[in-house]
Amino acid sequence: MPSPVPRPWPALFAATAAVALAACSPTFNWRETPIADAGLIAMLPCRPDRAHRALPLGAESVQVDMAGCEAGGATFAIAHASAGSPEQAETWLTAWRAAARSQLGNAQVTEAPATLKRATASPAPVRLDAQPPQQGAAPVQVLWFAQSQKDGRVSLYQATVLGRPTAPDAAATFFDGLRLP
């Protein structure tokens, strides 16, 4: 009886499957991600890292929760803080915007009113787009918005894209994917 001839097919199929699986691993693997406990759902292009830190907003140090990740040449992040009242929310959001602008140096900055379904009218949503003057420096897109909670508190958010994503619609997908309850 002749000895069996080894067949390369199993190894070939395994190699083909590995290549196919790698090809199916997209740069932007969009997923719904809950942010803090306030109910915001964000679309992020990758599994987010989470952190907490104190952020100086005016005269106060405010606890901020963050979720973000890097994909396709850009960082996508959401920060959340909880203010005790609409007045405090307005003060904090103004300080948050000023702190962000101060870090942009002499970048070309455009700031304009924005809209987001179910966001508060005061403080109103604001969009910032910044292009640093240095060739190759990372552009920044930011959206600040707030939502009143049933207990009288106000949730504040900063959604940021830092860098130039490799997919032209990635920033729009990120910002359009923000959903307040």
Image (spheres, rainbow, N blue to C red):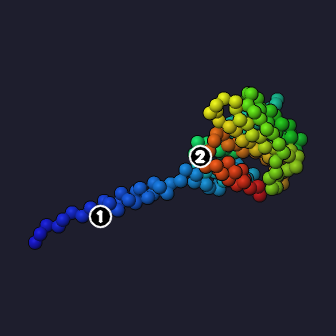
Residue at (26, 61) in percent of width and height: 8
Q: Which residue is mark 1?
A: 9
Determine the residue located farthest toward the left in the rendered image.
1
Q: Which residue is mark 2?
A: 166
Residue 77, located in which quarter of the rendered image?
A: top right
Residue 49 position, x and y percent, is 60, 44
Task: Return the mark for residue 118.
Answer: none
Residue 47 position, x and y percent, is 58, 50
Residue at (69, 45) in percent of width and height: 78
Q: Earlier in the sequence, mark 1 or mark 2?
A: 1
For residue 152, side relative to residue 176 (left or right): right
Residue 165 position, x and y percent, is 62, 45
**Vertical order, 42 against 99 (above or below):** below
**Vertical order, 119 against 50 (above or below):** below
Element under disc 2: loop
Residue at (63, 41) in percent of width and height: 164
Q: Is residue 102 visible?
A: yes
**Vertical order, 34 against 7 (above or below):** above
